[in-house]
Image (cartoon, rainbow, N blue to C red):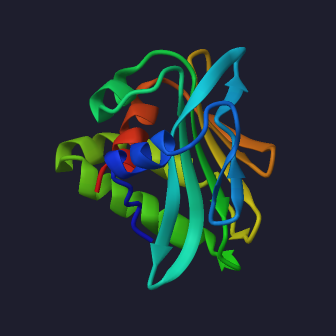
Amino acid sequence: MNIRFTFFSLLLLCFLSTNGYAQEVAGVKVPEQVTLANTNLKLNGAGTRSKFFFKIYVGALYLPQKTNDAETAISMDGPKRILMHFLYKEVEKEKLIEGWVDGFKNNHTNEQFDAFKTTLEAFNALFVTVKRGDRIELDYLPETGTRVRINDQIKGSIPGKGFYSALLRVWLGE
């Protein structure tokens, strides 16, 4: 599974929504804002990830401020959230891992990928097979780093800001 979202298509969906209300994407209500670490995060975009004509998940990006620039989103201070709400009947853990590895390879130089390889392995170890209706939240918390929650259960964390920035490059990249 290759993680492919273009930032501008996500923003287009965001600008078509009504402020303050949840928008609906593929039958999933996506709130205009969420609270994380006592910070109101704003929806910067939402869309579906499809593969071979099958809708796999609805994805959403929440940031402290709205922006239409990927580099600004990546470097922005404060908490952040990537939300994945699964639509497909089952996505095996191995497919999730394959998607993240491919995404890191496609959006980073070989040197950058090598630098994150051990951290990416620790991140991938936090995942499980997911089913329709399951939610994965990938949060950046300044005091913690990258936190992985699946169906409201914290699976673990990766310390530091660098890994989440690399993760956003995957989410907003190729």
Please state which of residues 138 and 11 is positioned toward the viewer in this rendering.
11
Residue 39, placed above or below residue 147: above
Displayed quadrant of residue 80: top right
Please state which of residues 98 and 132 is positioned toward the viewer in this rendering.
132
Q: In this image, 172 relative to 20: left or right?
A: left
Residue 114, placed above or below residue 33: below
Instruction: Tell me the residue at 30%/31% (across/down).
Output: 69
| Residue projecting furthest to the bottom | 52
From the top left corner, tell me how far across and down residue 109 is, in percent.
18, 47
From the top left corner, tell me how far across and down residue 83 is, in percent.
61, 47
From the top left corner, tell me how far across and down residue 82 is, in percent.
56, 42
Quadrant in which the N terminus appears: bottom left
Would residue 108 be visible to someone looking at this image? yes
Q: In this image, 79 relative to 9: left or right?
A: right
Instruction: Tell me the residue at 72%/14% (across/down).
Output: 38
Instruction: Tell me the residue at 70%/38% (across/down).
Output: 21
Quadrant in which the C terminus appears: bottom left
Marks counted in the figure total: 0
Instruction: Tell me the residue at 37%/60% (across/down).
Output: 4
From the top left corner, tell me how far across and down residue 94 is, in percent.
55, 72
Would residue 127 be visible to someone looking at this image? no
Residue 173, placed above or below residue 143: below
